[in-house]
Image: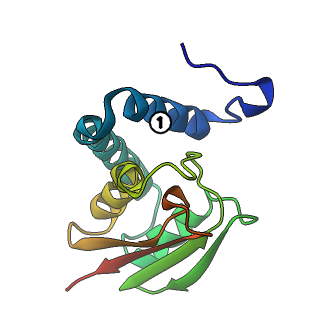
Amino acid sequence: MIKVNDDELPKNSIEAQGLLIKSIYKKFGKESLSVIKDACRIQGRALGLKIIKKLPNNRLTTVGEAFSKSLDPKFVKIIFLSDEKFQIQGTKCPFCLENTSRELCEATMTIDHEYFRTAVSDKIKLKIIKTVAAGDPYCDTIYELKK
């Protein structure tokens, strides 16, 4: 059984999902990463299909702006946004993966990568430059559309 103090309880569904992801990873280790990645990919595709129905176009600037509205501006800022590149930095992981591992971050970020691949183009590449999951002071993530 997972034990958490009342002040550590998830505050929303994303934090609850992060708790589940961390629990699976803790119990099954690296072997669980492919399962986590597959589930996150499916979720990202579903979210990407949902958002493109609400937007006037599928340009990276349009999808990036819509994506940004779901982020807490106290913790995340847009560094760069164009039709070719979207870079964001954040000091808090929405999944609460701080100080877990880079590989767990990469598996979980399949949600966002697939979201952009579905909503914009399957040519979108994801670069995770820094991640709080690996102990970095902030996350630095770039989505780039290769033509």
Residue 82: x percent and y percent?
45, 87
Q: Is residue 23 left or right of residue 94?
A: left
Q: Is residue 59 left or right of residue 2?
A: left
Classify 84 as above or below 91: below
Q: Residue at x 63, y 19 (%)?
A: 3
Q: Residue at x 76, y 65 (%)?
A: 74
Label 1 belongs to which residue? 22
Classify 85 as above or below 110: below
Give, as a three-letter code, the residue at label 1. Lys
SS under mark 1: helix
Residue that sits furthest to the top in the current view: 1
Residue 14: x percent and y percent?
57, 40
In this picture the colour scheme is rainbow
Q: Is residue 129 left or right of residue 79?
A: left
Q: Is residue 93 left or right of residue 140?
A: right
Residue 140: x percent and y percent?
51, 74
Q: Residue at x 35, y 63 (%)?
A: 116
Q: Who is closer to the viewer here, 58 or 25?
A: 25
Quarter occupied by residue 57: bottom left
Residue 51: x percent and y percent?
44, 54
Q: Who is closer to the viewer here, 116 or 140?
A: 140
Q: Who is closer to the viewer here, 109 or 67?
A: 109
